[in-house]
Amino acid sequence: MHHVVISQIGAAKVWRDAARRFLASGTPPDQILWGDVSSTPDLFAQAENALSQGMITVPRSFVALANTVVWHNDPQRFARLYAFLWRLRDAPHLMGDRGDADLAHLRRMEKNVRRCQHKMKAFVRFREIGRPDAPRRSFAAWFEPTHNTVEPTADFFARRFGDMDWRILTPHVSAVFQGGKVTFIKGQSKPDLPEDASEELWITYFRNIFNPARLKVQAMQSEMPKKYWKNLPEAAAIPDLIATAPARARQMALNAPTLPPKRMAQAQAQLAAHTSAWDGPKDALPAAISACTRCPLHCTATQAVLGQGPTDATVMIVGEQPGDQEDLQGKPLVGPAGQLFDHLALKAGLDRHAAYVTNAVKHFKFRAQGRRRIHQRPNTSEIEHCRWWLNAELSLVKPRLVLAMGATAAQALTGRGDTITARRGQVERTPSGQNVLITFHPSYILRARDPANKQAATEALIEDLKTASATQ
Ligand code: URA
């Protein structure tokens, strides 16, 4: 049986060298007793001299794992590492085996050590101990790490505080940085370090970064465990900060700026566009519509197509939007759908010229296909933008009845976008209370494939045109 005692200082290298030699000499784990005391490495050297030397290869990932796990406070860490290393000889793939219980245990230990290193970096607080006239400033910190993390973390402090001398004192091993070089000495009991002028600064800083509205005591204690509090100057402020957090959060809310968010201006402009109305002189309406740029449709259309008919008409006919022909001629309902409308209106006895005929949207919307312009339905935003003009026409003409032909007209007039079939023949209302008779659009009849449907829709439209004609 081999007895190995590993010193606390330099444990990583000492364990690594020993493990290599044991492995090279084929010494199984049950032949070794690993010890862990705060003693000099000489003890180990005595045991080591007897061991043979040899070249062995070990996966890099294991070396990295071992270099961290050796700093764990578990007395079994060296034995665990060696037992796993022994298994690795014949099964190097083990390092990738997530189901292996030994590896999983070592990974947990590795995580504990890393977490402890992280805490150390965050919670070591130096106090100045040097003479004010000394050429180099000198500091000391007392820290009580859970694991043996002074040694593997010292480099971090050397990099960060390279321009001063410092020492981190702990119960087990202490690090001393002097003249740009780190050495490790035995641990000690807590020294009486002087109060530091920077402590007040820490407390003030901590008070300022503490957000009472985000107070989560549990999360805070897991990030800054209570065991570290006694050595943290700022921790003295924590109980008070927790106790006063609700009141401070309320005060923060009261002090919060009341400026509206950026999008508010845009939302208000949109709302204004919906709720306000065109209020120019009556005879300026055609020119205003012609000059409309409220939505992008004006960019591609030839012109805005204005309503047509007497402005004192009792009936107002509203279609969807100009088609190809209407766009070119600048008149509503003159293309194929308009011709069908004229034909049915005649049958129903409606005098088109005595009615005010217009569209929900004033510009033609299309998709170019070769030389053809294919009609596209206007979207909700385009309908909404153009409602401004339709409302202006409604208040100008003040018709007794509005005939809404198709879903776009019905949506623009009533605000309801559902399909026509269930609503056709019914009188609905505009928001300002005008009567709107819902009916089919002539182009729906033109598009209908099923003859029976075509017939039924035609009869329905004639019936609605008759109703409108009765209002004239
Ligand atoms: N369709 C409409 O709704 N209106 C027109 O002016 C032309 C076709």
Image: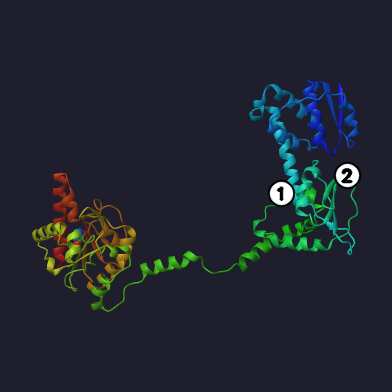
The image shows residue 394, relative to residue 12, as above or below, that is below
Between disc 1 and disc 2, the foreground one is 2
Q: Nearer the viewer, residue 215 or 149?
A: 149
Image region (quadrant) for ligand 1: bottom left
Q: Label 1 to label 2, Cα distance in Å?
A: 29 Å
Is residue 76 in view from this perspective?
A: no
> Crowdedness of circle 2 by 10 Å Cα count: few (<14), some, many (20+)?
some
- What secondary structure is marked by label 1? helix
- Residue at 75% across / 49% down in the picture? 156
Q: Nearer the viewer, residue 362 or 212?
A: 362
Mark seen at residue 185: 2
Q: CB of mark 1 within 8 Å of CB of mark 2?
A: no
Quadrant of the rendered image containing residue 19: top right
- What secondary structure is marked by label 2? strand
Q: Nearer the viewer, residue 241 or 222?
A: 222
Check disc 1 and report the residue beneath it: 223
Quadrant of the rendered image containing residue 440: bottom left
> Can you give x and y, in whole percent of width and height, for residue 42 in the image?
90, 33
Q: Nearer the viewer, residue 194 or 414?
A: 194
Quadrant of the rendered image containing residue 135: bottom right
